[in-house]
Image (tube, rainbow, N blue to C red):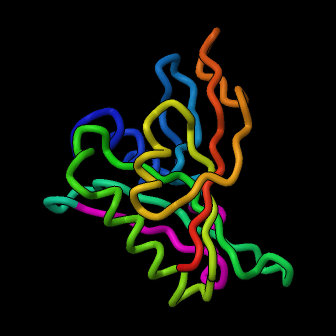
Amino acid sequence: MRGAWGTARLRGAGTGGRTRGAEGGTRRTPWCRAGSGLAPATSRLLTASLGGELAGWLHVRRDPARLVAHWGTLHHVQTRPELRGRGIGGALMGYVRQVAREELGLEQLHLAARGGAGLEEFYGRLGWRESGRRPGVLRFGPGDDRDEVLMDLAPL
């Protein structure tokens, strides 16, 4: 796999989830963070490949508590930037809907998306609806605060 996206995530996944940062320090990769929360009864890590290489992935998780066990949350929904626009994200989202319903017994899915990146439109085309917004809670840099957009998909 080529590119910084793939290199960091694959190298991190294969070395216990740590990669070297630009300053020489180490950091936990999303693979490691998602993998540490995997449990067969409550979560799945789904991947998509193209030409034998990782093209995208996501983590779906549900809470076993009785009051909320009927819904799950998507985390770390990502596709390789150079492969976007090829239907990989849409295919992953369709597959997670099936897995959530058939394997985890879920009725609803929830996610939080970064505002201002076109994600509301992407998820909207797939049947998700905006259920809330947290203004300016995501800080990407000085003067670059963005909304967190809460979205739901029901029924599955």
Which percent across, then down, holds residue 118? 43, 38
Q: Is residue 94 above or below residue 29?
A: below
Which percent across, then down, holds residue 27? 58, 35
Q: Is residue 12 left or right of residue 36?
A: left
Q: Nearer the viewer, residue 102 or 41?
A: 102
Q: Is residue 146 above or below residue 11?
A: above
Which percent across, then down, holds residue 36? 63, 61
Q: Is residue 24 left or right of residue 107?
A: left
Is 39 colored magenta in this rendering? yes
Q: Is residue 25 left or right of residue 82?
A: right
Instruction: Say which residue appears at 60% left-offset and 16% top-offset.
Output: 144
Q: Nearer the viewer, residue 144 or 17?
A: 144
Q: Is residue 112 left or right of residue 119?
A: right
The stretch in magenta equals 35-49
Q: Is residue 105 above or below residue 9?
A: below
Farthest-out residue, top = 142
Counting the numbered discs, the total is 0
Q: Is residue 118 above or below residue 31?
A: above
Residue 80, quarter of the rendered image: top left
Instruction: Say which residue appears at 47% left-offset and 75% top-offset.
Output: 97
Q: Nearer the viewer, residue 64 or 150?
A: 150
Which percent across, then down, holds residue 77? 48, 53
Is 28 colored magenta in this rendering? no
Instruction: Say which residue appears at 31% left-offset and 66% top-offset.
Output: 91
